[in-house]
Amino acid sequence: MSRSLNRKQDIYRINRDLFVLSYGALVAQLCKDYERDEDVNKYLDAMGYNIGIRLIEDFLANTGIKKCRSYNETVDVIAKVAFKTYLGITPTLIGGNDGGNSFSLILDTNPLDDYVEELPPGRSSLSYCNLLSGIIRGALEMIHLPADVSFIQDRLKGDDVTEIGITFLQKSNERKSKRNK
């Protein structure tokens, strides 16, 4: 049993490393194809969105997660289950204690920038990991929870941590009133 578990972990690690290296090559090619960082950021977000709208089906089928009762519970599942499942990390959740609709995920480590020391010269507004924003946004939209998802802090831009902000576009009390109609 222990041997098969180690083999699964090795395969997971290889898949993750292959993805991270491929992602780096993709971003490098996009930087060659597009002059403006905004265009690269938009492309990465759109790519992530398309991944997210498909990935949510896999996530729900493989985890058995049922409908969350609040935004706080939803973001908690994203942090503790989705990130752990697909990236092998568990971000820290900040916000939502007041029943609001804005949250932050703090990533102490970000696998997408494991092999990146700094942004390319002249690319200071590049949001290198913008794919993650799109994935989260796409997945949430597929379960009828439209949200604005963006990077607030980024280690590649000199910040101490990487922080992803998630703001649900409906207040939680609006969702309840629509359900009661």
Image: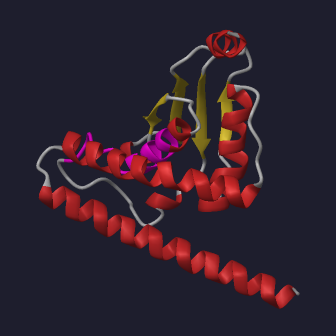
Let me know if residue 125 is in the magenta part.
yes
Residue at screen point 40% across, 51% down: 50
Of the pair 138 and 18, the residue shown nearer to us: 138
Q: Position of residue 56 (x, y in %)?
A: 58, 51
**Can you tell which quarter of the image residue 116 is in?**
bottom left
Quarter of the rendering occupied by the C terminus: top right
Extreme residue in the bottom direction = 3
Is 3 drawn above or below residue 181 in the view shown? below
Q: Position of residue 76 (x, y in %)?
A: 72, 38
Is 44 drawn above or below residue 62 in the view shown? above
Extreme residue in the right direction = 1
Residue at screen point 53% across, 44% down: 139
Let me know if residue 54 is in the magenta part.
no
Residue at screen point 54% across, 76% down: 15
Q: Which residues are magenta?
A: 123-138
Q: How many numbered marks does the figure carry?
A: 0
Q: Is residue 177 left or right of residue 110?
A: right
**Can you tell which quarter of the image residue 124 is in?**
top left
Q: Is residue 154 left or right of residue 85?
A: left
Is residue 150 in view? yes
